[in-house]
Image (cartoon, rainbow, N blue to C red):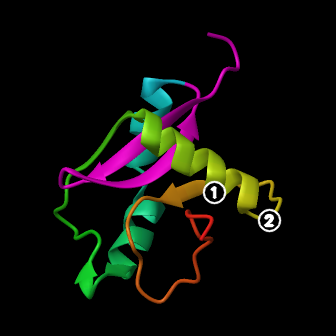
């Protein structure tokens, strides 16, 4: 597999929430257990409801075709950064989000 990156989706309580790159399933699982990521998700809301709680289940899985397309579009439109890029697959309240639709 080498350095090939794969796209994964983080499901929060079964809801596809965030797309991200990882080198392996193990790395994706490690990312999903990151306390800072959980804290960030707990601080955000979607349509007025918390995206994540302290007891939410965070589970990674391989991304589907539409999710990969959304992630790649976000990467293309995002400003250049040395930080890992993650793309929300849901509406996030109060964030200016790069549009996923050309309209």
Structural crowding at the residue carrying mark 2, measured as other residues with C-alpha within 10 Å and reported as few (<14), some (14–19) or many (≥20): few
Q: Say whether residue 2 is magenta.
A: yes
Q: Which residues are magenta?
A: 1-23
Q: Where residue 47 appears, x then y in whole percent?
A: 28, 84
Q: Is residue 84 visible?
A: no
Q: Is residue 101 above or below residue 64?
A: below
Q: Is residue 2 visible?
A: yes
**Earlier sequence position, callout 1 versus callout 2:** 1
Dot 1 alpha-carbon crowd within 10 angstroms: few under 14, some 14 to 19, many 20 or more: many
- Residue lying farthest top? 1
Q: Is residue 85 magenta?
A: no
| Residue at the image position 43 percent from the left and 25 percent from the top | 25
The chief SS type of the magenta part is strand
Percent from the top left, x then y, of residue 70?
53, 50
Gap in angstroms between the C-alphas marked 1 and 2: 10 Å
Residue at the spot of label 1: 74
Task: Answer above or below: position of 30 versus 100.
Answer: above
Residue visible at 47% across and 64% down in the picture: 36
Q: Secondary structure at mark 1?
A: helix
* Quadrant of the snapshot with the C terminus: bottom right
Quadrant the N terminus occupies: top right
Q: Is residue 98 rendered to the left or right of residue 26? A: right
Q: Is residue 66 above or below residue 46?
A: above
Please tell me the numbered disc located at residue 79: 2
Name the quadrant containing residue 90. bottom left
Mark in front: 1 vs 2: 1
């Amino acid at each position: 597999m080498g350095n090939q990156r794969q796209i994964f989706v983080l499901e929060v309580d079964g809801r596809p929430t965030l797309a991200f790159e990882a080198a392996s399933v193990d790395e994706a699982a490690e990312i999903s257990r990151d306390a800072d990521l959980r804290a960030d998700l707990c601080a955000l809301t979607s349509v007025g409801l918390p995206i994540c709680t302290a007891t939410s289940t965070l589970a990674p899985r391989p991304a589907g075709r539409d999710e990969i397309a959304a992630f790649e579009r976000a990467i293309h439109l995002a400003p250049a950064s040395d930080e890992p890029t993650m793309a929300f697959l849901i509406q996030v309240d109060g964030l200016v989000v790069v549009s996923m639709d050309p309209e």
